[in-house]
Image (cartoon, helix red, strand yellow):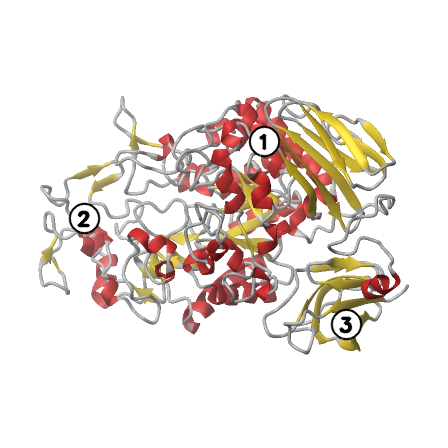
């Protein structure tokens, strides 16, 4: 058995010493502890390391000063250049001799044919596709854990009884429908934050109260979080845990910090009196109806007077003197802010920022990183060591349980270098961890680079994928190893896909160079906050064929496709993604309960929907073609009603030519490609290319996916892929 030898060319701006960190080296399990092993300087900028006794390994290179490559995999000797990839021979020697072979930035030799087929590693998250769901709104397996929030309760018009609990889906239900997600073809599930929450409308998980504890409204004795992780893994499905770093709920953090409030059970609306509240399950007062003491802020670091009231007086009738004002409650109409709001000037500076609330133009300025997002989202002092220790340690526990990847909420609200402290700590704890984040922009995200954006670079998505500090030069720093949701591509959709066109897509793809690694962007058509139409507030309302064409694009361009629950059947089409009007309830929005479509009686109908079958086949095709997962894009050509491009993984190891049509049929012609036999994964059509030029026909809203030496047709024809 030959030892594995790897070489790495140090970028000019990296530190002088280069390290290699590796894990899961085989044939015997081997790994290093961070920072790994110092590599040998072999001159001319190259560094080398020999794996004694190992023939394959996962690895990364870094300089010990914050600059590092992506997580890599190698099963034979090779030379690696940042942003250039692997070479089987020394590329400097090739350049000196004039040899070809696919040097980065060069034109592929059309006479070079594909080599051995690529292998799925199971360790590169680009191989996955993601199904995103709100756990509490997906499928109910244990009705005993269902819970009504105080706000937005739906009442039956005929009986007047409350229905559709906000916390309705749970882990038990999700486990029962893992096979549904697997049948649809997804290999990763992104769940909303599962940690314990507190607020008047906390079903979605973004109002964290205790990061160390899973919310009991999601778990059952026979369906814990660990059970969900284990059952998903049995099916080859990975779990992505959503994590909030930026903020806590308005009541503090259990066991760490208390935010001053009065117990909610003493609140009396104006014109009412204690004991007369009649709000669904909230009878008598608005305290937590599911707890005997009717107060859910069980914080051991709360003042003694609060802890005493937490354990007594469920009816909220024993007079309580507000220690802040000296007034006595319960009292009709007494300041609601003392129960539900915060005083931004009196927060504990050990845990919270002190700069007030975001308003107006603050959303596109440095203020987003200083001010509180909302009354129930209170900005943590994320640069303080106690906050870092708490959040990093809490999430490490879930990684130890088997969580496979992390999605970070509200990224632009945390300065990049500060956020990367968290990301890098989690990646060091679990080598190979994939971490991506939400940096919501309504524009392309180019920042100071210009081109239709509305905010500076340091809060834009690309900035977080880089390590440099020049807002006009992404290449001033290398890849940060942190990926982001692709809001830039998404932002074009209301002007193209929602109108039956691909117009403008190429302009965004041409800017991929600004990202640290564009192939790790997480692409999407809609999510729980935004949809592509109008002002982004609504679920996709375009025609079904438009959605099909959108998925064709997302499943074949660079990036990792992500589907929001229900898109596969046009669920709540055109509805607002979140509540808008004062009287809106969740059943009127894109966050409606989906489980009615997943019952034993209806799941067959759900699975027969044309878009369900369309997405299922796209997943089959992408899973079988590594170039669609990991290959850089080239030869991009877009003309509104069509788009074509090439995906080339590992210099011909997997090579595919893609042509997409939206609306009517299209003729596709792509030149300057490799010669050989191409087979279409959609139709099975076979074309022999000997002159570097491939021409083929694509039916309206379908795709041509011509794979060099490919397997031919994958999956069954449907309404759109045919």
Identity of the residue drawn at 53% across and 22% down: 601
Say whether residue 486 is left or right of residue 285. Answer: right
- The residue where tag 1 is placed is 640
Tell me where residue 61 appears, x and y as whole percent. 69, 68
Callout 2 environment at 10 Å: few (<14), some (14 to 19), or many (20+)?
some
Task: Using the numbered discs, state the Cα–Cα distance from disc 3 to disc 1 in whole angstroms.
Answer: 45 Å
Identity of the residue drawn at 64% across and 66% down: 68
Tell me where residue 120 appears, x and y as whole percent. 74, 48
Task: Using the numbered discs, state the Cα–Cα distance from disc 3 to disc 2 in whole angstroms.
Answer: 73 Å
Identity of the residue drawn at 52% across and 40% down: 174
Q: Is residue 402 at least partly visible in the picture?
A: no
Q: Is 596 located above or below residue 243 in the figure?
A: above
Task: Using the numbered discs, state the Cα–Cα distance from disc 2 to disc 1 in whole angstroms.
Answer: 64 Å
Q: Mark 2 or mark 3, which is nearer the start of the sequence?
A: 3
Tell me where residue 706 appears, x and y as whole percent. 76, 34
Given the current orientation, which residue lies at the most extreme right position?
A: 1
Q: State the SS at label 2.
A: loop
Q: Is residue 121 at least partly visible in the picture?
A: yes
Say whether residue 203 is left or right of residue 450. Answer: left
Callout 1 environment at 10 Å: few (<14), some (14 to 19), or many (20+)?
some
Q: Mark 1 or mark 3, which is nearer the start of the sequence?
A: 3
Q: Residue 315 shows which numbered tag?
A: 2
Question: Which numbered mark, 3 or 1, is in the foreground of this view?
Answer: 1
Question: Which numbered mark, 2 or 1, is in the foreground of this view?
Answer: 1
In the picture, the quarter occupied by the N terminus is bottom right
- The residue where tag 3 is placed is 46
Q: State the SS at label 3.
A: strand
Residue in front for this viewpoint, 676 or 719: 676
């Amino acid at each position: 058995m030959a030892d594995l030898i790897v070489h790495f060319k140090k970028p000019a701006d990296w530190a002088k010493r280069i390290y290699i960190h590796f894990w899961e080296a085989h044939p015997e399990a081997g790994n290093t502890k961070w920072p790994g092993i110092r590599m040998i300087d072999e001159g001319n900028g190259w560094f080398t390391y020999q794996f004694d006794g190992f023939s394959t390994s996962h690895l990364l290179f870094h300089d010990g000063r914050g600059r590092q490559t992506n997580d890599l995999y190698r099963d034979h000797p090779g030379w690696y250049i940042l942003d250039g990839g692997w070479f089987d021979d020394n590329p400097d020697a090739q350049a000196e001799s004039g040899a070809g072979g696919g040097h980065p930035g060069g034109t592929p030799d059309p006479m070079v044919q594909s080599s051995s087929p690529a292998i799925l590693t199971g360790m590169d998250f680009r191989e996955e596709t993601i199904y995103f769901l709100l756990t509490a709104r997906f499928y109910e397996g244990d009705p005993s854990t269902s819970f009504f929030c105080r706000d937005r309760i739906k009442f039956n018009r005929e009986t007047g009884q409350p229905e559709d609990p906000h916390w309705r889906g749970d882990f038990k239900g999700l486990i029962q429908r893992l096979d549904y997600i697997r049948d649809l073809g997804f290999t990763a599930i992104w769940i909303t934050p599962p940690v314990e929450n507190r607020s008047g409308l906390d079903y979605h998980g973004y109002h964290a109260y205790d990061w160390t504890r899973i919310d009991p409204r999601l778990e059952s004795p026979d369906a814990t979080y660990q059970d969900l992780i284990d059952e998903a893994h049995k099916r080859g499905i990975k779990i992505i845990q959503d994590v909030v770093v930026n903020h806590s709920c308005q009541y503090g953090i259990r066991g760490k910090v208390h935010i001053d409030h009065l117990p909610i059970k003493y609140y009396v609306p104006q014109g009412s009196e204690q004991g007369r509240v009649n709000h669904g399950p909230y009878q008598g007062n608005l305290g937590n109806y599911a707890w005997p003491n009717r107060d859910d802020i069980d914080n051991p670091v709360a003042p003694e007077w609060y802890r005493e009231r937490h354990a007594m007086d469920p009816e909220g009738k024993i007079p309580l003197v507000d220690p802040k004002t000296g007034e006595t409650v319960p009292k009709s109409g007494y300041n609601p802010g003392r129960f539900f709001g915060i005083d931004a000037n009196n927060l504990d500076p050990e845990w919270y920022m002190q700069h007030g609330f975001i308003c107006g133009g603050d959303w596109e300025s440095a203020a987003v990183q200083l001010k509180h997002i909302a009354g129930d989202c209170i900005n943590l002092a994320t640069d303080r060591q106690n906050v870092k220790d708490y959040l990093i340690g809490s999430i490490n526990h879930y990684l130890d349980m088997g969580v496979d990847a992390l999605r970070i909420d509200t990224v632009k609200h945390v300065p990049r270098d500060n956020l990367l402290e968290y990301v890098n700590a989690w990646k060091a704890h679990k080598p190979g961890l994939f971490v991506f984040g939400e940096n919501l922009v309504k524009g392309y995200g180019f920042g100071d680079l210009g081109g239709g954006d509305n905010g500076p670079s340091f809060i834009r998505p690309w900035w977080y994928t880089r390590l440099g500090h020049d807002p006009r030069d992404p290449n001033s720093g290398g890849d940060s190893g942190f990926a982001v949701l692709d809001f830039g591509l998404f932002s074009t959709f209301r002007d193209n896909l929602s109108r039956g066109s691909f117009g403008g897509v190429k302009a965004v793809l041409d800017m991929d160079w600004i990202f640290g690694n564009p192939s790790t962007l997480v692409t999407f058509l809609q999510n729980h906050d935004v949809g592509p139409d109008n002002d982004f507030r609504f679920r996709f309302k375009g025609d079904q064929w438009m959605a099909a064409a959108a998925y064709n694009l997302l499943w074949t361009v660079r990036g990792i496709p992500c589907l929001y629950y229900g898109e596969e059947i046009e669920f709540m089409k055109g509805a607002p993604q979140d509540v808008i009007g004062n009287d809106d309830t969740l059943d009127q929005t894109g966050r409606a309960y989906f489980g009615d479509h997943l019952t034993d009686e209806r799941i067959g109908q759900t699975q027969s929907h044309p878009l369900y079958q369309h997405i299922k086949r796209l997943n089959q095709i992408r899973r079988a073609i590594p170039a669609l997962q990991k290959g850089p894009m080239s030869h991009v050509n877009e003309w509104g009603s069509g788009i074509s491009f090439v995906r080339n993984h590992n210099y011909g190891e997997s090579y595919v030519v893609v042509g997409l049509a939206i609306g009517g049929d299209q003729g596709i012609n792509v030149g300057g490609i490799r010669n050989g036999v191409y087979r279409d994964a959609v139709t099975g059509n076979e074309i022999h290319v000997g002159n570097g030029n491939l021409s083929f026909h694509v039916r309206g809203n379908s795709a041509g996916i011509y794979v060099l030496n490919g397997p031919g047709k994958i999956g069954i024809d449907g309404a759109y892929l045919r």
